[in-house]
């Protein structure tokens, strides 16, 4: 094979140019063309994902160059999210298996779980039961099991395909004895019980935004993204039922992306607490059980 590429540095320069030329959208783990290119090249070459510099000028085999170029071209031409190419996504130092059956994990709730949702949870060790709605790949359920070491975690999704992916991740982290997966519509498949914490990263993209999504996001299951005209269809149902499933001092935490205006229009009468994350103060809100409506 005759190629102008000899080293990872050559591939990296080319990939950044190719991705920029293709006007790719990022947000599935990388924020820019350089980070995405570095990740895909390191992954394809089976090199440590956090160690680029020592290998930049290493001479590559023709087969390695060919494999990397195929990955670069697939990302640029097909606009497939990198996570679907590598079959993995990373959140807070943990690797999760993903494929086209689930959206690529990217939840700000994950970083809030790093602190055990304090101060809204007085003592993470005292949490006995956690529920995650719309679990997808199961990543937040797994992070919740870590944040609340004495809790049983129930995780629900309406998609049987998504739950197959979640099962792979739950089993991979050896948490089958602590995380129970349920197939069904929100609270419907659950046995009667009360939870100290309910978390959800539900479908919340409003219909106008759905029409404007970049091609990368169109590779993801629309079921996990589309939230109706104002994005609040599923959120309304969660808020309407959550009090029946929470303990007296329990909390509900919901991620809503860029939909704060629609949240406040729909639920302005409720005592919403907006939580600070690396994405700002508009992405995740919390409601105490006592402030939720009763059915």
Image (cartoon, rainbow, N blue to C red):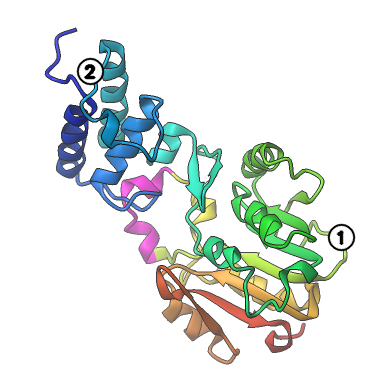
Name the residue at the left extreme: 4
Q: Position of residue 55 (x, y in %)?
A: 28, 28
Residue, x 65% and y 71% (percent of image)? 237
Q: Is residue 57 above or below residue 165?
A: above
Where, by quadrant of the figure, is residue 47 drawn?
Answer: top left
Question: Is 233 on the left-hand or right-hand side of 155?
Answer: left
Q: Residue furthest right?
A: 192
Q: Secondary structure at mark 2?
A: loop
Q: Which residue is mark 1?
A: 191
Point out residue 206 in the picture as x, y percentages from the top left corner: 43, 67
Report the quarter where the N terminus lies: top left
Identify the residue at image location x=63%, y=81%: 287
Picture quadrant of residue 219? top left
In the image, is residue 92 above or below residue 165?
A: below
In the displayed structure image, the side of residue 121 where residue 61 appears, left or right: left
Q: Which region shows up in magenta?
A: 208-219
Is residue 211 visible to the viewer in this orientation of the structure? yes
> Above or below — where is 224 with respect to 42?
below
Tag on residue 153?
A: none
Q: Judging from the image, what secondary structure is the residue with disc 1 in? A: loop
Q: Nearer the viewer, residue 230 or 263?
A: 263
Label 2 or label 1, whichever comes before in sequence order: 2
On the image, which quarter does residue 135 sit in? bottom right
Please give the name of the residue rendered at 40% of the width and 68% of the height, measured from the top-left corner. 279
Image coordinates of residue 148 in percent, x first then y, are 72, 62
Image side of residue 134 versus residue 214, left or right: right
**In the image, which disc is placed on residue 59?**
2
269 in the magenta segment: no
Quadrant in the picture for the C terminus: bottom right
Q: Residue furthest bottom?
A: 269
């Amino acid at each position: 094979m005759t190629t102008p590429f000899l080293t990872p540095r050559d591939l990296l320069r080319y990939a950044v140019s190719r991705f920029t030329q293709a006007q790719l959208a990022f947000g599935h783990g990388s924020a820019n063309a350089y980070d995405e290119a570095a990740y895909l090249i390191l992954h394809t070459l089976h090199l440590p994902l956090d160690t680029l510099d020592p290998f930049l000028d290493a001479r590559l085999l023709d087969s390695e160059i060919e494999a990397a170029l195929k990955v670069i071209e697939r990302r640029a031409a097909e606009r497939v999210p990198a996570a679907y190419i590598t079959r993995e996504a990373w959140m807070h130092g943990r690797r999760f298996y993903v494929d086209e059956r689930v959206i690529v994990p990217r939840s700000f709730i994950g970083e809030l779980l790093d602190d055990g949702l304090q101060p809204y949870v007085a003592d993470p060790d005292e949490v006995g039961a956690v529920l995650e709605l719309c679990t997808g790949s199961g990543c937040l359920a797994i992070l919740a099991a870590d944040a609340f070491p004495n809790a049983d975690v129930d995780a629900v999704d309406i998609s049987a395909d998504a739950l197959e992916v979640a099962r792979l991740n739950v089993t991979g982290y050896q948490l089958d004895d602590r995380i129970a997966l349920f197939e069904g519509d929100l609270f419907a498949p659950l046995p009667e019980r009360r939870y100290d914490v309910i978390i959800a990263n539900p479908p919340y993209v409003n219909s106008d935004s759905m029409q404007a999504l970049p091609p990368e996001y169109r590779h993801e299951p629309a079921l996990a993204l589309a939230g109706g005209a104002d994005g609040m269809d599923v959120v309304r149902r969660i808020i309407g039922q959550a009090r029946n499933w929470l303990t007296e001092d329990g909390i509900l935490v919901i991620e809503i992306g860029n939909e704060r205006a629609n949240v406040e229009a729909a639920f302005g009468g409720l005592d919403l607490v907006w939580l600070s994350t690396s994405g700002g103060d508009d992405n995740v809100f919390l409601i105490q059980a006592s402030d939720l409506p009763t059915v």
